[in-house]
Image (cartoon, rainbow, N blue to C red):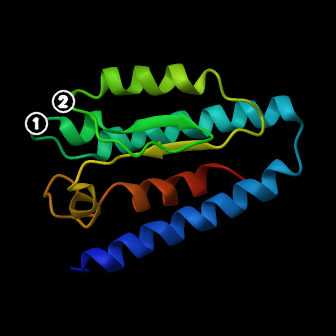
Amino acid sequence: MMDVEASVAQAKAAVSRFNAELRNFAKQVAPQELRDVKRKIGMKALYRLILKTPVDTGRARANWQVTLNVDSNMSLERTDKSGGPTLVAGEATLSNVKAHDVIYITNNVAYIEVLENGHSKQAPAGMLAVTVEELRGLFP
């Protein structure tokens, strides 16, 4: 099993590659189409992250936060075992996305890196790196 630093580095590299691919795509499409694609990618990413997040109390699942143009640096004191309310909150934010907005999906619970490293048997491959690779396969 990889150590936490290697796992986090792998996730960050996957996100960087995906972001570069999205920037190249954005240069080739109209603003309306770009907005629609961003919203679609954001929703698919959030949905997949929520579903892949291991559930004990539901706190890690509830802490997937969607923001536009600035990332969140706070951890929420709520739980969401089903993921439904977290998905609805993210969808509300994504409904306001504009063509050149940056979408941030963050999770700031103290133990999220441990979960990404596969500490939970519910998500032995983590959540973020797996989701990014899945998304890369869905979009040009």
Question: With 54 as the anchor, is 45 left or right in this view?
Answer: right
* Direction from residue 104 to residue 115 in the image, left or right: left
Question: What amino acid is found at the position of numbered circle 1 in the picture?
Answer: Thr
Residue 81: numbered disc = 2
Other-residue count near label 1 (Cα within 10 Å), few / some / many at <14 / 14–19 / ≥20: few
Q: Residue at x 35, y 46 (%)?
A: 107
What label does residue 40 carry, if any? none
Q: Nearer the viewer, residue 138 or 104?
A: 104
Residue that badge 1 annotates: 57
Amino acid carrying label 2: it is Lys
Q: CA gap, disc 2 to disc 1? A: 7 Å
Determine whether, in the image, residue 43 is placed left or right of residue 34. left
- Element type where label 1 sits in the image: loop
Determine the residue positioned at 32% across, 77% down.
5
Q: Are marks 2 and 1 in contact (CB under 8 Å)?
A: yes
How many labels sit on residues?
2
Q: Earlier in the sequence, mark 2 or mark 1?
A: 1
The residue at the point 26 percent across, 67 percent down is 117
Q: Secondary structure at mark 2?
A: loop
Extreme-left residue of the structure: 56
Position of residue 31 measured from the top left corner of the image (x, y, whole percent): 86, 34
64 to 11, vertically: above or below:
above
Tell which of 132 and 97 is nearer to you.
Answer: 97
Q: Quadrant of residue 99?
A: top right
Front residue of 134/104: it is 104
Residue 87 x, y percent position in the rendering: 40, 26
